[in-house]
C-alpha cells in the first residue's frame, strides 16, 4: 500500500529555501508512489496551544480552528514531514505552533487516533556552520521521543541566506528528492532509482 505523507511547510517566504526543498521532497515521494498532502503552517488560521489539558481527556484538541484540519491529516498520514527555516536556532513561530498542537498525540487516547509513525525534518539556516542545527535537532528529537515517532530523515541545509540561495546548491535539492523517495519506500540501492535521480536534479 502506498505511503501517506503529510508535509507541513513553515516559512513565511512562500518561495524560500525550505519550501523549495519541501517541493523537491514531494516530487521524489510522488514519483515513488506516495500520496502526499501539503499544508502551509503560515496559512493555517490556528491558535497556539492553550495548555488546558482537555486534549488528554479526548485525544484531540477542543479548539475550533484550523487545528481540526491538522488533526484530520494526523489521523490519515503515515509520515509527518516538518519543514522550517531556523529562526533564533529554533523552529519558525509558524511551525512551533504546529508542534505545540501535536500535544494531544502524547496522550494514550491521542496516540490511538493518530496514524503517524514516522517523522522527518527539513531545516534551512544562513549560518555556514552545521553546528547551527544543534538546538533544532535536539527539539525535534524531543518531539519524536514524546510522540513515539521514528525519525526517518533529516535534511539540514546550511549556508542559505536569501530566498533563492538553495538554487546554488543542487546537492540539497537532490538530497530532498532522494529523501522523498526513501520516505515513500523506494529502494535507494536499485540502479533505476539512481538513474531517475540524475534526471530530476
Ligand atoms: C527571524 C529570523 C531569525 C533567524 N535566525 C537564524 C539563526 O538562528 N541561525 C541561522 O543560521 N539563520 C537564521 N536565520 C536565517 C534563515 O534561517 C535562513 O535564511 C533560511 O534559509 C531561511 O529559510 P526560508 O528561505 O525557507 O525562509 C534567521 C532569519 C530570520 C528572518
Image (cartoon, rainbow, N blue to C red):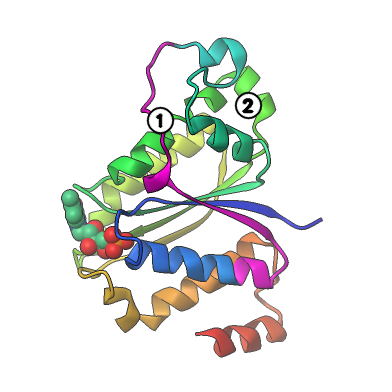
Residue 5 in the image, given as x and y percentages of width and height: 62, 53
Within 10 Å of disc 1 (Cα), the crowding (few <14, some 14-19, many 20+) is some
Up the image or down, 188 lies above or below 183; here it is: below
Residue 100 numbered tag = 1
Q: Is mark 1 within 8 Å of ligand 1?
A: no
Between 66 and 35, the residue placed more toward the observer is: 66
Give the residue displayed 30% in from the left and 83% down from the top.
168
Residue 111 numbered tag = 2
Tag in front: 1 or 2: 1
**Residue span colored magenta:** 28-52
Residue 127 numbered tag = none
Residue 45 in the image, given as x and y percentages of width and height: 41, 36
Q: Secondary structure at mark 2?
A: helix
Give the residue displayed 36% in from the left and 57% down from the top.
123
Q: Quadrant of residue 47?
A: top left
Distance in Å between CA atoms under marks 1 and 2? 15 Å
Between 12 and 109, the residue placed more toward the observer is: 12
Q: Quarter of the image containing the N terminus?
A: bottom right
Q: Quadrant of residue 48?
A: top left
Within 10 Å of disc 2 (Cα), the crowding (few <14, some 14-19, many 20+) is many
Residue 181 shows up from this direction: no
Residue 133 shows up from this direction: yes
Q: Earlier in the sequence, mark 1 or mark 2?
A: 1
Residue 3 in the image, given as x and y percentages of width and height: 71, 55
* Residue 44 colored in magenta in the image: yes
Residue 82 in the image, given as x and y percentages of width and height: 46, 50
* Residue 49 colored in magenta in the image: yes
Report ligand 1 position as a quadrant. Answer: bottom left
Amino acid at each position: 500500500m502506498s505511503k501517506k505523507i503529510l508535509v507541513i511547510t513553515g516559512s513565511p517566504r512562500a518561495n524560500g529555501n525550505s519550501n523549495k526543498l519541501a517541493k523537491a521532497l514531494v516530487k521524489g515521494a510522488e514519483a515513488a508512489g506516495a500520496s502526499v498532502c501539503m499544508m502551509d503552517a503560515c496559512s493555517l488560521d490556528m491558535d497556539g496551544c492553550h495548555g488546558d489539558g482537555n486534549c488528554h481527556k479526548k485525544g484531540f484538541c477542543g479548539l475550533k480552528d484550523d487545528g481540526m484540519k491538522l488533526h484530520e491529516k494526523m489521523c490519515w498520514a503515515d509520515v509527518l514531514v516538518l519543514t522550517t527555516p531556523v529562526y533564533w536556532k529554533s523552529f519558525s513561530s509558524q511551525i512551533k505552533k504546529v508542534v505545540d498542537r501535536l500535544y494531544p498525540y502524547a496522550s494514550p487516547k491521542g496516540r490511538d487516533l493518530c496514524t503517524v509513525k514516522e517523522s522527518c525534518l527539513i531545516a534551512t539556516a544562513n549560518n555556514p556552520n552545521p553546528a547551527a542545527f544543534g538546538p533544532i535537532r535536539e527539539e525535534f528529537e524531543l518531539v519524536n521521543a514524546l510522540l513515539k515517532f521514528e525519525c526517518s530523515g533529516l535534511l539540514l541545509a546550511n549556508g542559505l541566506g536569501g530566498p533563492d540561495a538553495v538554487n546554488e546548491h543542487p546537492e540539497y535539492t537532490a538530497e530532498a528528492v532522494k529523501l522523498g523517495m526513501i520516505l515513500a519506500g523506494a529502494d535507494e540501492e536499485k540502479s533505476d532509482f539512481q538513474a531517475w535521480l540524475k534526471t530530476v536534479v
